[in-house]
Image (cartoon, rainbow, N blue to C red):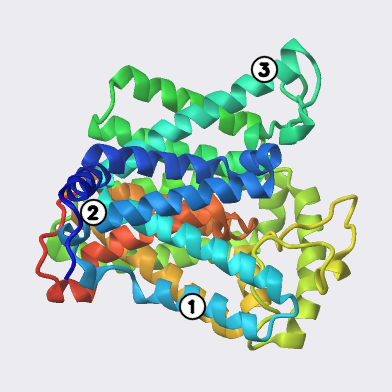
Amino acid sequence: MIQPPPRYRVAIEIGAAILGSPRFSSALSTATIAVALCAFALRQTLGDAGLLAILSSLLVLVAGSLAAQWGNIGWRALVPISLMVFTLWTWVSLFWSQYKLESFAAATSLLVFTVLGIYIALVRDTIQIVRAFGDVMRFVLVLSIGLEILTGLIFDTSLKALSIAGNLGTTDPIQGIFGARNQLGIIAVIALITFATELRTRSVERGLSIGSLVLGSVVLLLSQSPLAFGTALVILAASGALYALRRVPSGRRRYWQFVLIGFVASAAVISWLSRVAIVAWFDASGDLAYRLKVWRQLWDLGEVHRLEGWGWIGPWDAELAPFTAFGNFGGRVPDSAHNAYLDVWFQLGLVGFLIFLGLLGLAFMRSWLLASRRRSIVFAWPALVLLALIVSAFAESSLLIEFGWLTFVVCCVKAARELSWRNALDTKPQSAI
């Protein structure tokens, strides 16, 4: 084997030391989360080409960092099989897709964010991941509020480049840098989970944690998102259930888990029977009527390719068939099914839908068991964040793209590396947190 000259060998060793250092992994993980979270704003300001250039650069750095740390990671328990199967099925759908070029681009985007999420889960401990999410979310929430103050109170105008309507001085909801109130509200809920975890683990100063919680609460209220409010209530209930389960003796915890499942099933049935009153209470009748129109049209078209779906596309393209059939509902052109489960069924068929349900179910079950068994409170973060994504997916499809998918992959891989059956094959020591 030909050896490189000594001067090049030294440069390679220095580069490997930098790429494999914890500080570089920390900075790269934080930057990746920031790009995923600000993807909408970056696309609006830099265009698709600019966002693609940033993601390509991140991929190159991630590949180098992984190569430098190759020997320190237990690769036999690398990725949940269900995640690999779902990602593969999005690529298989290219064979029958009616829009092959767009499907290729969407499948590539999903794969990119999958790889980035896997990297974060592999090279950072859970508490480090929480800190990275917390730092990024503090920044984007402050930026969102700052821009809303500038447009709504100081200049009394709108910022069309970021779809900010400047509603802070009115009774209308704000959008922040995410383009829609539901997106801002969901981000605020995940941010509150993150800030509360930081407070409980004392990973940042108490004053900063409390200030962050106040910031997240204010943003959540100003978003006026019924979906985010409902998700927040579910998270509060789940947090109380976790608090109680963690104090049950381990020998009886399994029985109380079944009691909790029965309670959740009963609550779901009651919520369904009381759906009209719940929608009225959240003042979401307009949003629901719009979504019902989209879902009815989607159901009719989905029956054409019930088993395999129309082909993966991620966010909808209104200029492509069959999405042209959705037209203009109440002045709004749908860019998704506004339901991740129906979106997966429509794009990937019944096969993809069942794979997706299995992926979500396994990820949440593993994370919930970890949260109820492990002593450190930091294990509650993946479970509660996954629950927030799963609940919000009933009215938005953001789980399937960019920040939503990256966050899901991080939580999914982190839980799988702790509870996967393949851990028995892995000789590498697993991280404590």
The answer to whether 166 appears left or right of 313 in the picture is: right
User: Which residue position is annotated with label 1?
Assistant: 88
Q: Is residue 218 visible?
A: no
Other residues around mark 2 within 10 Å, as few (<14) / some (14–19) / many (≥20): some
User: Which residue position is annotated with label 3?
Assistant: 149
The residue type indicated by label 2 comes to: Ala
Rendered location of residue 128, percent (x, y)? 27, 41
Q: Give me the C-alpha separation between circle 3 and circle 2.
A: 44 Å
Q: Earlier in the sequence, mark 1 or mark 3?
A: 1
Give the residue drawn at x 65%, y 68%: 343
Give the number of the mark in front: 3 or 2: 2
Vertically, is 54 above or below 245?
Answer: above
Give the residue drawn at x 36%, y 59%: 118
Does the residue at mark 3 contact the one at mark 2 (Cβ under 8 Å)?
no
User: Which residue position is annotated with label 2?
Assistant: 68
Numbered marks: total = 3
Vertically, is 98 above or below 263?
Answer: below
The answer to whether 151 appears left or right of 415 in the picture is: right
Q: Give me the C-alpha separation between circle 1 and circle 3.
A: 44 Å
Give the number of the mark in front: 1 or 3: 1
